[in-house]
Image: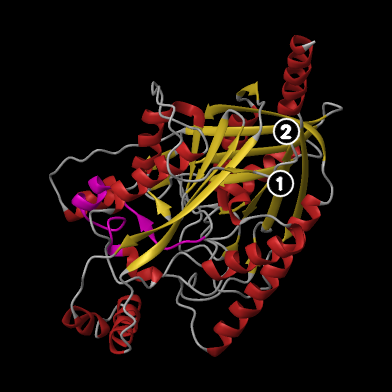
Amino acid sequence: MIALRCLLLLALALTLNGEFRAGVARVKITPETPVWLMGFGARTHPAAEVGLDLYAKALALEDGAKGRVVIVTADLIGFTERSTNELARRVKTRHGLRRDQIVFLASHTHSGPAVLDRMTISQGEGPAFDREAETYTVRLIDQLEQLISAALEKLEPVSVSSGWAEAGFAFNRRTEQLAVIRPGETFPAPVDHRVPVLRLKGKDGRDFALLFGYACHPTVLTGDTYEVSGDYPGYAQASVEESLPGVTAMFIPLSAGDQRATPRGSRMLAQKHGKSLAEAAMSAKLAPITGLMQTAIEEIRLPFASHTKEAYEAEALSTDRFAARRGKAMLAAMAAKKMPLATAYPIQAIRIGQITLLALPGEVVVDYALSFKARYGNRVIVAGYANFLPGYIPSLRVQREGGYEAGDAMMYFMQPGWFTDEVEPLVLGNAARVLKSIGLLPSGSTSGSRGSLSPNRAR
């Protein structure tokens, strides 16, 4: 009798482990034109044309034990703490989801609108610009709240599988800038051409949702292009949805901080790269996903290097409007004794059976993805641009090489300047701790310890 009961319990556990329900929803978030586009400071006027509509999409996923997660993707340059904190508060009140159960992923298109309060990387400024950006942000938050609710309210049985493919149009853009600032020297130029895929099918066999990622800046449309667009990720999603009628395609941005497409410079090239990425995603060799979901999140602090008042005074007089803006802002912060010494950095992990999404904020350089690949193989998808965008997240190698991603770009994010050399060990160490808390250990590890974090079931 005891043996029979054990067998029945095992059968029940296996049944639960193999069951998923999912719901998807989408909403168009194309701004009204004319609109200033974010991402290129050299643009001199707003865009009046829409080349490709922008969308936000949500996938709600429930496992066999009623654990839930929600993945939100959007054709935006980035989310902000203001927007995601407010959305998380509303979703908890309305649906009971904890913060670790929902993740926000922005494609980082450089052909979308401003999202307040930090994502204003353009020459647009003044009261009219601020009013338009505020109106868009308030409406966006309302739209995303309804989007998440819609996905959660229409769950249906699905099967889930995952796999990997490759696309080869990304290259390491630092080779170009380092050739200028440090001529004659040779530097590594790592890339990650992997395309992770998560595919959901309805019980009738129809394609339900296809999530895929890539490590490459959505800057195929360059600074001399004045059209609203999701760039190559938008065209990739559109291509998948055209090829698989009824499917919802969602793009996951990976460690693209120092990666760029080649060639680039036109809508035609954005369409070409998007189609090649879509074809790779649809051709991935997949394996079924079973098991329950686990989630974890931990917020750490990434410290900034110290800077002098004299440096900001000089910067405030710069002819570069972005440098001058940052210099003035930091002088004001110093005077008010509110100088930021570090930025918040939430590290989030969502484990769905055999695959784990590690969601990192900011423009994470490719070294991080390659480091986790060496430790965990293809069990971990390292997403950047998650939840909000505090700036570039360089590796120690990139910091020592210098240049844009190493810290020079931080003025565009209104940050004090470069991070300290602690950034890479802080991110890697704490991310490993978060992964360990949901039972994920590096390949070859035999330790049974689950770490000091309290793991969360996705219930």
Look at the numbered discs 1 and 2 and tell me whether their residues touch, using CB distance below 8 Å.
Answer: yes
Check the picture and name the quadrant holding the N terminus.
top right
- Which residue occupies 30% across, 48% down? 424
Task: Name the residue carrying label 1.
Answer: 59
Q: Is residue 143 left or right of residue 368?
A: right
- Residue 186 lies, in percent from the top left, at 17, 40
SS at mark 1 in the image: strand
368 lies above or below 387:
above
- Residue 210 lies, in percent from the top left, at 68, 37
341 lies above or below 373:
below
Pick whichever of labels 1 and 2 is earlier in the sequence. 1
Task: Name the residue carrying label 2.
Answer: 200
- Residue 33 lies, in percent from the top left, at 66, 73
Looking at the image, which is closer to me, 400 or 67?
A: 67
Q: How is the image coloured?
A: secondary structure
Q: Which residues are magenta?
A: 388-408
Residue type at the position of mark 1: Leu
Residue placed furthest toward the right: 204
- Which residue occupies 52% across, 62% down? 225
SS at mark 2 in the image: strand
Residue 37 visible within the image: no
